[in-house]
Image (cartoon, grey):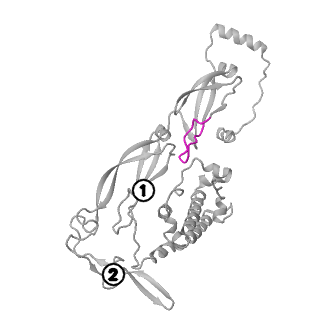
Amino acid sequence: MTQKKRDYYEVLGVAKTASADEIKKAYRKLALKHHPDRNPDNKEEAETKFKEASEAYEVLSDNEKRANFDKFGHEGLSGYSSRVSSASVDDIFDSFGDIFSDSVFSEFFASHRTDGRSRSRGVSIRCEIIIEFEEAYHGAKKTIHVRRDELCDRCNGSRKEPGTNAVTCAQCAGLGVLVQTHGFFSMRTTCPRCGGEGKFIESPCTKCRGRGKTPVKRELEITIPAGVENESRLRVAGEGEPSLDGAARGDLYCDIYVKPHALFERIGNDIYCEMNISFIHATLGAEIEVPTLGGKTQMKIPPGTQNAQVFRLKGMGFPQISHQDHGDELVRVFIEMPKKLTKRQDELLKEFAKTDSYTASPRKKEKGFFERLKDFF
């Protein structure tokens, strides 16, 4: 049985009127409290709570997502992808790195290593991919070229010339840090002589000039999932740059930009289009052919249809990335009046006018179209 998600404000322990700064502070506090490394006896439960807090922060720190959540609850987020739901703890730190960079997190993780030096993941890189509207609907595979650093094939990332050795720093004895003790307290500082490396390289590699890496160009095939949104970001694990100290590679983050369509506009997972119909169609009813992203389909126009009326074609919108459901297609019809009538048409309409008792009257001011469209949902 699927467990019902908690209210995100309840998860972070903040009021619905909380400011962005209050939400950020609450998340940092919970993230530190529930980090798995701080809960070695109950890592699984801690990771669950850590991710729950991260998911809540991901939504409440985004103005658009927060507004949808406030109005519709969890249902209002169905059209959005999440960076947190399937990410590891390390990936979450990469995504929200700006939040933790100045916090006690950095000290906490460094203290877990006896040599004082934390192993750092490889650098993550980014790229931009522009896709067609139809590719966002159906999904696609795109070949891209990225420039990234790879381990130098001469020194294999050691940064030193093959056959030579690095010299241990005498000031920190190879630890990379200096530890000063004052009573019950100790303070760690980066060794100023070796810059935290613990060693000196006297003979740097002649190919990479002591960098340990060289720039290369790589061709990659990226899978674009069906339903991807404009300006969304895809993470391709392990396709970033390598680490010099044996930690995991960085990731590749692809920013997706969807070209606008000539006929359709996307609204969440729904698509919107406009159709012209004749006043005969509107008056007597008809069945018209309507374009969709999956091909053409028939739509019934009931008798008495009004100008600018909106119809819904169920399941004809964008697929949701997280499951199999689709949005709908919203079709707004405009009644197009004939500019010129035949003699017979003119006679028939005049005959009809004799039986019409309609009287012109002032029209009350209505809501704007997009406000009315919100009511339609």
- Residue 179 in the image: x percent, y percent? 42, 85
User: Mark 1 is on which residue type?
Assistant: Ala
Q: Residue 357: name its quadrant.
A: top right
- Residues 375 and 7: in front is 7
* Residue 165 appears in view: yes
SS class, disc 1: loop
Residue 18 visible in rendering: no
Q: Which mark is residue 237?
A: 1
Measured as percent of width and height from the top left, residue 292 is found at 54, 32
- Which mark is first along the chain, 1 or 2? 2
- Pick the quarter of the image with the C terminus: top right
What's drawn in magenta, residue-wise?
314-328
Which secondary structure class fits the magenta region best?
Answer: loop
Identify residue type, mark 2: Gly
Q: With respect to residue 237, does 285 lie above or below?
A: above
Residue 125 x, y percent position in the rendering: 39, 57
Q: Is residue 176 left or right of residue 95?
A: left
Q: Residue at x 72, y 11 (%)?
A: 350
Determine which residue is flagged by label 2: 174
Mark 1: give few (<14), some (14-19) or many (20+) Cα within 10 Å. Answer: some
